[in-house]
Image (cartoon, coloured by chain):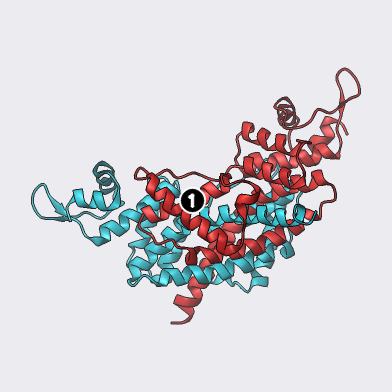
Chain colours: A red, B cyan
Amino acid sequence: MKLAELSERSGVSTATIKYYLREELLPPGRRISATRAEYGEEHLRRLRLVRAMIQVGRMPVAKAREVIAALDDDSLDHHARLGAAAWALPHGPEPKDDAQNTEDTGAARATADALLESLGWDYSRELGAESPAYGMLIDAIGTMRRLGYPCDVGQLLPYGRLTAQLAVTELDLVERYETPEGQVEAAVALTVLHEPILLSLRRLAQAEESNRRFVEST
Amino acid sequence: MKLAELSERSGVSTATIKYYLREELLPPGRRISATRAEYGEEHLRRLRLVRAMIQVGRMPVAKAREVIAALDDDSLDHHARLGAAAWALPHGPEPKDDAQNTEDTGAARATADALLESLGWDYSRELGAESPAYGMLIDAIGTMRRLGYPCDVGQLLPYGRLTAQLAVTELDLVERYETPEGQVEAAVALTVLHEPILLSLRRLAQAEESNRRFVEST
């Protein structure tokens, strides 16, 4: 398809598509003349992913380019590509408390490790102990403690168990895509796009449960 | 306790505490002389909540003040205070797509309503149909569709069921706090503080499940 059709089918303006091409977020089209290029379904799919990352995930272009590079890295196997792309995804704000110190972080890390062990996740085996998600978990535990809120393994386990169930559903969705490239792209897009769905449903579920306890029972 | 002790016990500098007092995020201390005031446990507790909202939740001061006002509103009952405080909490970025239109939003709203009905959440009954979390859910569904990713009730149901289970655990935690004021403050703080925990565990669970499917099986 021509650029105009790619724009129409994706709902993204031709100016924005040209910008993504310049920034190497989209692979170049196939040249058919000095001034024209032809685009395929893979461009449409990639364009959707880029929109998900930049619009919904609020990722800077440089960060999105890093994710794309991981997706396109032929030297990695399927799981490693998924991992590398997830690694490059932003992991929310990283709270750095003014009272933070090494002792706090050590205690938070011990809690995180005990939690992962209880869950049977041998995380160190695969992505290494320093993945951004692992760091984010340690930060979140440390911050809760410093603010004076309890945060032990028992309290965190339900979150771990439920996300494990969720991951099965999420990987099932990813496996519906036929090609390995399609799967990796879907994994990244769904990680980003399902985040606001998860957070909004959590708030709605809390309101529902609060209503059940504090209103219906009176 | 004196200001210096409040600072030491909370790990928040006296300058920051004075700023929060001026901004009415903390109630004034009890005057004991022209230049000195006395602070109590309720100040320490409130200070922790303010730190959670501003540091972890990245909320602007004006937004935090709105949440505090809902907490302190004696005209509301317990559930309504929880609801008002949750309402004032920020709900993440609200994606507004350039291709967004009324027809898309109507279809997304119909999906959201069908989902809530399947879950048995009579949400309209209580906080009204226009709560921020409900709006965020509709936006997220609409964005997925516009980007060309499928998003139907069947795909969303697991998220709803799991957050319903989570809400039971979360409200149990809140009910451990003895006073109604403590409960409402804890509900707000835990909503904010558990968000990064939920999101980081989701990423770790995905990596674990991906490893199980694509590495261990080969």
Task: Say how many tags the image has.
Answer: 1
Residue A28 drawn above or below residue A179: above
Chain ID at mark 1: A
- Residue A93 percent across, percent down from the top left: 50, 44
Residue A11 seen from this side = no
Q: Quadrant of residue A42?
A: top right
Q: Viewed as shown, does residue A97 lie left or right of B140?
A: left
Q: Quadrant of the N terminus of chain A?
A: top right
**Front residue (pair B167, B34):** B167
Q: Quadrant of residue B111?
A: bottom right
- Residue A2 percent across, percent down from the top left: 86, 31
Residue at the image position 55 percent from the left and 49 percent from the top = A134
Residue B205 drawn above or below residue B148: below
Residue B67 seen from this side = yes
Crowding at dot 1, Cα within 10 Å, few <14 / some 14-19 / many 20+, comes out as many
Find numbered disc 1 in the image and state the secondary structure of the residue it sits on: helix
Residue at the image position 47 percent from the left and 57 percent from the top = A111
- Residue A201 percent across, percent down from the top left: 59, 62
Residue B91 drawn above or below residue A21: below
Q: Viewed as shown, does residue B4 lie left or right of B129?
A: left
Residue at the image position 47 percent from the left and 59 percent from the top = B191
Q: Residue furthest bottom?
A: A218
**Front residue (pair A117, A59):** A117
Q: Viewed as shown, does residue B147 lie left or right of A138?
A: right
Question: Label 1: which residue?
Answer: A138
Q: Residue furthest right?
A: A32
Amino acid type for the residue under numbered disc 1: Ile
Residue at the image position 51 percent from the left and 76 percent from the top = A212
